[in-house]
Image (tube, rainbow, N blue to C red):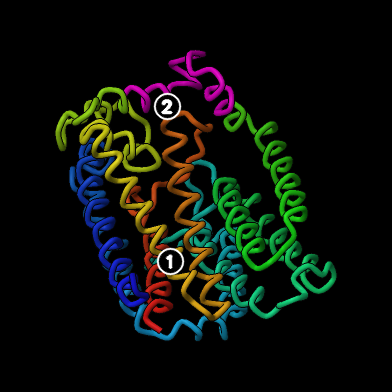
Amino acid sequence: MKLSSSGKALTILVFLLVAFGLIMLSSAGVVEGQKRFGSSSYFFQHQLIYGVIPGLLLFFLFSRVHYKIWKKISLPLLIFIVGLMVLIFIPRFGLAVKGAQRWLDLGFVSFQPSEFLKLAMIIYLAAWFSQRGSYIQNWSYSIIPFLFILSFVGLLLILQPDIKTLAIVIIISMAMYFFAGAKMTHILSFLLIFAILVGLLSYFEPYRLNRIKAYLNPLIDQQGVSYHINQALLSVGSGGMFGLGFGQSQQKINYLPEPVGDSIFAVIVEELGFIGGVAVLGLFIFLILVLIFIAKNTHDQFGKLFVLGTAVWLTAQTFINVGAILNLIPLTGVPLPFFSYGSSSLVGLMAAMGIARSVARH
């Protein structure tokens, strides 16, 4: 496959995932939309207007703009996004939802800056690491500044709190650091430190600790702490090989928590079966492989690191979400890319795909 062909393949796969995601969201959100907003098509319409359309516009725009411009503005972009995250804690602008201070309300629009932080971090780290060269393993020149940036961003996410985004940002950052040429011992040491941090945050927060308990023993308190995972597994198991049929999920009818959010994969498997679930994962894997191919054949270090960072972002969110629904890991609340409801997440990811398309184009 040529680099130009890989760019076309990326575009086709992104379109397929967006279209398929919107179709499945229209089914998963019927009951929830009617119950909460009085419209069975609420989630479909909101995702289309505020997620898909802006996302496609950014995808086409960024695919046409030469990707190297992002290297020049990487620091101002990161500062701007971090500034938006700081605004969250100001009562006039911050919007609390379910006890978490993650939304920024500007009056005419509200969104989650943390979803755009992932993209800003990938751009900044790709620019920063590409300039370090042989100094990438130097403590004072590379490692300490890298940890300082990651710690500051991590602190803002902890204060929200948004541990799932913190975990994704850490995975992306460490992977990009590794691709840039860091020592494996450094990577493992940092991951151990962050794993301990996340463990402590989970231990001192009851609902996170309950998720771990439910993962270790789904049979305990099936109407309480284990309710979510049991309903998700029941939904997956009900689908069988070929599913109950599109729109026929029973678990989305007031049983399965967050059917339009992080549980949407359970609805997909229940309605489309094992075959449908594998097909969705196949699209993701194919897109990830296309991104890796683009990175492998890109000679510019900034472009290479950016595409690899985007591939890690997509890989981490996809398999953490699916793994949690299948009880392979504890429930995390991480959304399924392109499918889960959330315009901020979709727009940020589409923007990243547009830049990756530009790397393939140029």
Q: Nearer the viewer, residue 268 or 84?
A: 268
Q: Secondary structure at mark 2?
A: helix
Q: Amino acid at mark 1?
A: Phe
Image height check: is 43 above or below 86? above
Q: Position of residue 143 (x, y in %)?
A: 78, 65
Give the label, 1 or 2, closer to the camera.
Answer: 1
> Residue 216 falls in which quadrant of the image?
top right
Q: Position of residue 117 (x, y in %)?
A: 54, 64
Taking 83 as reference, is 31 left or right? left
Q: Nearer the viewer, residue 92 or 267?
A: 267
For residue 293, the mark is: 1
Where is the N terminus found, in terms of image quarters? bottom left
Residue interval drawn in magenta:
210-234
Q: Position of residue 33 (x, y in %)?
A: 24, 42
Sequence-wise, the earlier of marks 1 and 2 is: 2
Q: Amino acid at mark 2?
A: His
Query: In the rendered structure, does residue 47 fall within the stretch colored magenta?
Result: no
Taking 82 as reference, is 352 left or right? left
For residue 9, the mark is: none
Where is the C terminus found, in terms of image quarters? bottom left
> Residue 184 falls in which quadrant of the image?
bottom right
Residue at 39% x, 79% y: name it.
358
Discs 1, 2 touching: Cβ within 8 Å: no
Q: Nearer the viewer, residue 90 or 261?
A: 261
Residue to which mark 2 is pinned: 228
Residue at 62% x, 70% y: name it.
125
Mark 2 packing: few (<14 Cα in 10 Å), some, or many (20+)? many
Q: Secondary structure at mark 1?
A: helix
Q: Is residue 47 visible?
A: no
So how many labels did they put on this image? 2
Distance from disc 1 to disc 2, alpha carbons, whole Å, reads 38 Å
